[in-house]
């Protein structure tokens, strides 16, 4: 039986880096975990202790770079020595990723785990967005007026890859009880029929919308509309969208996770 949420033992930066490399739906959780995690930087200082140390005062460090002045950063000490690229003892410091991003505010490129099977290149634009918290900015909000006549139907064409991304993302958010994809049309507007993602969300609605808007963007054809709606209530629209024919994800109740399939 498939478990719908990351196990606690897997919920760490290295595991998420691999998952995010394979499935786009895990990328928001990877970025969030990254900002709360420590990374290891290689340093050139010869007056620092060997290995990891904690600075008690202001300390000037010379960070080691690789080709094209890119900055290598590592999720653990073991990753420094992957593939035996670095064979000798090196000095390193452990710092919060958020602090590192503040240090390199210009046009620096940071590469996480450059010698490992799974790595991540952070470009200057990404670093700025992570630092400012604007990477998953909440999209435009519209309100569906009461009494509106709407039409909902089965989508004729949609990206199956988009559904894979939606499912993977939902597994990272315990707040999402279900996700439903339908063709939506409100004749009272000038908007053409378009895809609607109905989400049965318990909390953190704005954050979830913002993250989904970013990871689904490339799966939505240019100039086509795509809406998201919280259907956790019992309105007529919610009940229509929550029909099984539109369901693309359903949270497994916690008590079922301990049963044999």
Image: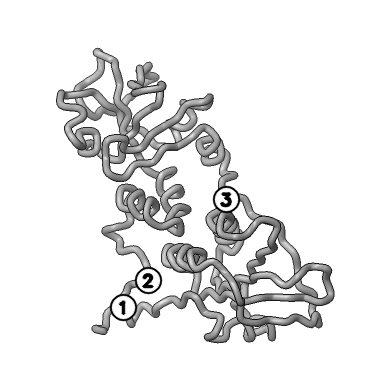
Q: Which residue is mark 3?
A: 136
Pick the residue in front: 160 or 186.
Answer: 160
Q: Inspect this view and state whether residue 207 appears.
A: no
Residue 37: image location, x then y, percent: 37, 43
Q: Which mark is residue 257?
A: 1
> Does the CB distance between marks 3 and 1 fall below 8 Å?
no
Q: Which residue is mark 2?
A: 4
N-terminal of the two: label 3 or label 1?
A: 3
From the viewer's perspective, is 55 left or right of 247? left
Residue 68: image location, x then y, percent: 41, 22
Which residue is located at x 47 percent, y 75 percent?
249
Q: Which mark is residue 6?
A: none
> Does the CB distance between marks 1 and 2 fall below 8 Å?
yes
Figure label count: 3
Callout 2 secondary element = loop
Label 1, label 2: how far apart the Cα atoms are: 9 Å
How crowded pointer 1 is (Cα within 10 Å; few <14, some 14-19, many 20+) is rated as: few
Residue 111: image location, x then y, percent: 38, 34
Which residue is located at x 53 percent, y 86 percent?
244
Which residue is located at x 38 percent, y 27 percent?
71
Callout 1 secondary element = helix
Which residue is located at x 56 percent, y 75 percent?
200
On the image, which quarter does residue 45 sit in?
Answer: top left
N-terminal of the two: label 2 or label 3?
A: 2
Q: Quadrant of the N terminus?
A: bottom left
Above or below — where is 56 with respect to 233?
above
């Amino acid at each position: 039986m498939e478990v719908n949420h990351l196990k606690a033992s897997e919920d760490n930066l290295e595991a998420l880096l691999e998952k995010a490399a394979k499935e786009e739906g895990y990328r928001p959780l990877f970025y969030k975990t990254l900002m709360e995690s420590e990374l290891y930087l290689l340093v050139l200082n010869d007056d620092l202790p060997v290995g990891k140390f904690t600075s008690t005062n202001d300390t000037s460090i010379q960070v080691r770079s690789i080709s094209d002045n890119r900055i290598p950063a590592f999720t653990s000490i073991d990753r420094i020595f992957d593939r035996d690229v670095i064979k000798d003892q090196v000095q390193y410091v452990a710092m919060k990723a958020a602090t590192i991003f503040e240090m390199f505010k210009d046009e620096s490129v940071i590469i996480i785990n450059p010698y490992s099977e799974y790595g991540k290149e952070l470009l200057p634009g990404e670093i700025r967005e992570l630092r400012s918290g604007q990477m998953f900015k909440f999209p435009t909000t519209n309100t569906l007026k009461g009494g509106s006549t709407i039409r909902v139907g089965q989508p004729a064409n949609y990206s199956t890859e988009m559904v894979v991304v939606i499912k993977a993302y939902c597994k990272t958010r315990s707040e999402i009880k279900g996700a439903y994809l339908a063709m939506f049309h409100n004749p009272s507007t000038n908007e053409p029929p378009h895809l609607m993602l109905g989400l049965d969300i318990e909390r953190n609605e704005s954050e979830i919308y913002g993250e989904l808007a970013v990871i689904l963007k490339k799966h939505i054809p240019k100039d086509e509309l795509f809406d998201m709606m919280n259907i956790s209530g019992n309105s007529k629209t919610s009940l229509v969208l929550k029909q099984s024919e539109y369901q693309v994800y359903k949270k497994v109740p916690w008590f079922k996770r301990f049963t044999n399939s």
